[in-house]
């Protein structure tokens, strides 16, 4: 969605000063001799509200329960700026000094929020808050600060898990159930907007199962009108029991500020990422369907004899995948997963992604106007052929790029679109030839100098020597490009 902005960097602070005029002094009335002054006893501690009537008084009990587990996340990295080649000339060095051509250093910084979900110091935040960063610090609500290690990054969901370096018995927030939410439920958003400090805003659940938002691969979001601003990213969306029901991730805005349309990642997706981090994994393994899903238009729905364009159409089925094993066929329409409605491919992907590997899921399917049930095996995508990751060296335009063979597992991990041929770029070194060529993570290299690239070893061989020119064919975002550059 064009207007959806990820909340990652704190905007410049605008200082505001308010002057308060002193109130006129009041003259105390004389006390009658022997009179005992009355006093008001301190109010008892308030508990989490148990009725709607109690909610009319204050959200303070919920905030007191949740706030200690909300943290501020500060991430940074040092960027080295290239030296100016003019300073290789001794005449320039004579006039400008020896140090002028030295590589510069620039500090890139990012600010966001997070929530502690385990007493050992596990913190959940957004991946875009710490993406590309090397140093991460976390500040608790009680002003303590800790260095943090990045345990797991999951770009597909825009989630990351950190581990506080020291300490134990940290305050935590309980994880709720995002599937139990209803539109109209009251929620709180807690975070550090614009770097002003921990802030609480209140709203309701505006919508559920928001798809086609364009923020992450699993586009299935909770929409809320609780004010979310830059710096809130990674902070919790909290229900009235003080439980995390979502991780605030993005806003829809034309100005950069909150207009009452915010998006949070459902906590049931967050749970799978936390489980992977606790298990020591470096990536989240999710169920693979072995099928290509397509949204239904009204025309397609009419052609299939459906009264509404809802569900996910199986456009293609891998003959060796779990969908084929379950008896699914091209043209089937998935309408539910384990009894929960699935209106589009994003909903099907989300429902399967939240389920643990090794079990089964029940799919409600429409075939030829009739409803059938299929049991699909929840298995990870196979890594066949092996990825055989190679970092390209030498003086070719690909030097500094790491490439992998394409397999179902790599397609899932890298969100590869449009082709299963070639090799995919998984990483590009800063300052490398590949970066100068503008190679990007996820690019698929199909051919070099008219030689088809089938494996990473093919690319390594083709780029081992020098060439007068480089004719490169690659795919990006489902489109194929060919370019020629000098050798």
Image (cartoon, helix red, strand yellow):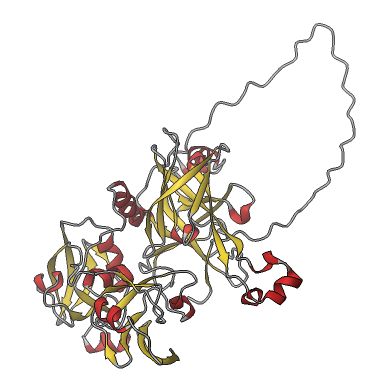
Judged left or right of residue 485, residue 78 is: right
Residue 113 rendering spot, x and y as whole percentages? 52, 51
Which residue shows up at 52% across the image and 32% down it?
Answer: 46
Q: Quadrant of residue 397?
A: bottom left
Residue 110, position as x, y percentages in the image? 55, 58
Side (left or right) of 486 relative to 34:
left
Snapshot quadrant of residue 347: bottom left
Q: Nearer the viewer, residue 431 or 326?
A: 431
Vertical relation: 204 (above or below) 403: above
**How many discs mark residues in the rendered view?**
0
In front: 398, or 289? 398
Vertical placement of 485 versus 333: above or below? below
- Give the residue displayed 38% in from the left and 58% down from the top: 153
Q: How far from the left and from the top, in percent, is residue 458?
A: 25, 81
- Residue 411 in view in this figure: yes
Q: Is residue 303 above or below residue 404?
A: below
Residue 262 in view of the camera: no
Horizontally, residue 286 falls left or right of residue 123, namely left
In the image shown, does 375 or 87 lie closer to the viewer? 87
Quadrant (top left/top right/bottom left/bottom right) for the C terminus: bottom left
Q: Position of residue 147 (x, y in %)?
A: 49, 44
């Amino acid at each position: 969605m064009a207007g959806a902005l990820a909340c990652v960097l704190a905007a410049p602070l605008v200082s505001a000063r308010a002057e308060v005029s002193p109130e006129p002094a009041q003259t105390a009335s004389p006390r009658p001799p022997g009179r005992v002054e009355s006093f008001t006893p301190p109010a008892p501690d308030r508990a989490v509200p148990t009725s709607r009537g109690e909610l009319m008084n204050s959200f303070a009990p919920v905030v007191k329960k949740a706030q200690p587990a909300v943290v501020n996340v500060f991430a940074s990295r040092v960027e080295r700026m290239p030296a100016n080649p003019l300073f290789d000339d001794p005449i320039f060095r004579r006039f400008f000094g020896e140090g002028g051509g030295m590589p510069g250093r620039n500090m890139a910084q990012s600010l966001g929020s997070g929530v502690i979900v385990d007493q050992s110091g596990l913190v959940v935040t957004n991946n875009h808050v710490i993406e590309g960063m090397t140093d991460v610090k976390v500040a608790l609500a009680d002003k303590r600060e800790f260095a943090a290690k990045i345990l797991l990054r999951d770009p597909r969901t825009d989630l990351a898990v950190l581990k506080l370096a020291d300490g134990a018995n940290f305050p935590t927030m309980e994880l709720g159930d995002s599937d139990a939410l209803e539109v109209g439920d009251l929620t709180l958003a807690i975070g550090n907007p614009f770097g002003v400090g921990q802030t609480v805003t209140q709203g309701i659940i505006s919508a559920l199962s928001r798809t086609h938002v364009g923020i992450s691969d699993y586009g299935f979001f909770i929409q809320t009108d609780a004010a979310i601003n830059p710096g809130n990213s990674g902070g919790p969306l909290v229900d009235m029991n003080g439980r995390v029901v979502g991780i605030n991730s993005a806003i829809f805005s034309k100005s950069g500020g909150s207009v009452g349309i915010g998006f949070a990642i459902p906590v049931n997706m967050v749970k799978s990422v936390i489980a992977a981090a606790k298990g020591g994994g470096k990536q989240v393994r999710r169920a693979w369907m072995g099928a290509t899903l397509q949204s239904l238009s009204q025309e397609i729905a009419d052609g299939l004899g459906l009264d509404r364009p809802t569900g996910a159409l199986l456009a293609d089925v891998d003959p060796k995948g779990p969908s084929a094993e379950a008896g699914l066929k091209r043209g089937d329409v998935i309408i539910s997963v384990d009894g929960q409605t699935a209106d589009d491919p994003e909903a099907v992907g989300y429902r399967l992604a939240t389920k643990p590997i090794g079990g089964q899921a029940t799919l409600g399917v429409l075939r030829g106007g009739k409803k059938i049930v299929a049991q699909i095996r929840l298995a990870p995508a196979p890594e066949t052929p092996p990825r055989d990751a190679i970092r390209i060296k030498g003086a070719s335009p690909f030097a500094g790029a790491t490439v992998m063979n394409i397999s179902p597992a790599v397609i899932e991990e890298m969100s590869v679109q449009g082709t299963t041929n070639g090799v995919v770029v998984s990483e590009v070194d800063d300052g490398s030839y590949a970066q100068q060529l503008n190679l990007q993570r996820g690019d698929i290299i199909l051919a070099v100098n008219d030689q088809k690239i089938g494996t990473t070893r093919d690319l390594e061989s083709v780029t081992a020597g020098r060439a007068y020119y480089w004719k490169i064919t690659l795919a990006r975002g489902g489109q194929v490009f060919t370019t020629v550059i000098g050798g």
